[in-house]
Image (cartoon, rainbow, N blue to C red):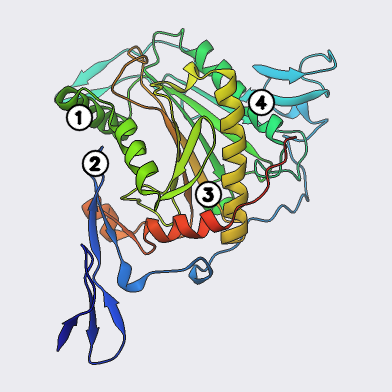
Amino acid sequence: MLRDTGGGRSPKFEIHGQGVNTLPELRKDPITGRWVIIATERAKRPSDFLRDKVQIHGSGFCPFCYGNESKTPPEILAYRNDGSTRNAPGWSLRVVPNKFPALGIEGSLNRQGEGLYDKMNGVGAHEVIIETPDHNMTLATLPAARVEDVLWAFRDRILDLKKDRRFKYILIFKNHGEAAGASLEHTHSQLIALPVVPKRVFEEVEGSREYYNFKERCIFCDIMRQEAENEIRVIAENREFISVAPFAPRFPFEMWLVPKVHRSAFEESQKSEFEQLAQILKDMLMRLDKVLDFPAYNYVIHTSPFPDSSNDYYHWHLEIMPKLTKVAGFEWGTGFYINPTPPEESAKFLREAAVTVAAG
């Protein structure tokens, strides 16, 4: 016999005195309309996830290390404080073309139809941001000022590539750890300029536009305002940014870093915002290391496509997704995700893991 022992929208039931069982929840992302299952009946704490922690071994040859500049393609951008020459030691950050690019920079799009099928040349840009010459550092352990340099490099490259009319979107992402797709352990991020807007980005932008057309407000601004009032999914905040566990997360311990002031495009951020973003990003990565024992993770910057990158309806943000679960048949077949950790719980663990961020 089932007896109701709880209240609110998530009733709890006691089964013949065998303990408390909470029914799973279906939650809908208000921006894209995507559904997720919060599997509360098998909720996992941080220690319940089985994984290999990311460790830096530093053995073997690394083309990203100091002194190996000739082993990468010629640099596109480098930050140097000592006036040293290009493609030589003396740098604190380098941007180089990916040696094995997903898309090629040369040529025209040459859009074609083949019956009902569409195709074009694989034109784009694929670059690697080498975040430090020190092989043993990570983005979490770099001083905040050096993390800020990484953000400025993202902006510099976006503004340059934005001039190319062939490109419609620039994706910036980081794969940290082999489980997250990193082929080299030396800390780096990647940038890919695309001649089309990715479907996932299009869905998010269109969901935001639809909300704005109906309410004349930005849905991200409304979400962040509500989250700040409720606080249960807020992890941390500073003057310019708030970090939250989203209401309908695809993955356990997923978090979003969102500007408090409406900004539609990452590259429109001001110096004070980059300073604050560097601090909260470093803080969140340090908390993940502390709570989840140095997990692999991905992060992705979601920003407005070109040419309408300045608008009132979309709000750029950075999404961090630890690699704790696997996408399998159910996810591929439905587009739903099963998340074994409620965002309220993950926010609580991360909130309580406050760490001191070095000013650096």
**Counting residues from the N terminus, which is met first, the one under dot 4 or under dot 2?**
2
Depicted 307 relative to depicted 359: above or below: above
Q: Circle 1 sits in a helix, a strand or a loop, which is it? A: helix
- The Cα–Cα distance between marks 3 and 1, rounded to whole angstroms, is 30 Å
Q: Return the x and y of residue 39 as percentages of the image width and height.
A: 30, 66
Q: Quadrant of residue 15?
A: bottom left
Cα separation between marks 3 and 4: 21 Å
Tag of residue 297 = 3
The answer to whether residue 14 is left or right of residue 351 is left
Residue pictured at 47% horizontal, 38% vertical: 242
Distance between the Cα atoms at labels 4 and 2? Answer: 33 Å
Q: Could you say which disc has been placed on residue 149 in the image? A: 4
Quarter of the picture holding the N terminus: bottom left
268 shown above or below 292: above
Pick whichever, 200 or 194, lies toward us: 200
Residue 211, disc: 1
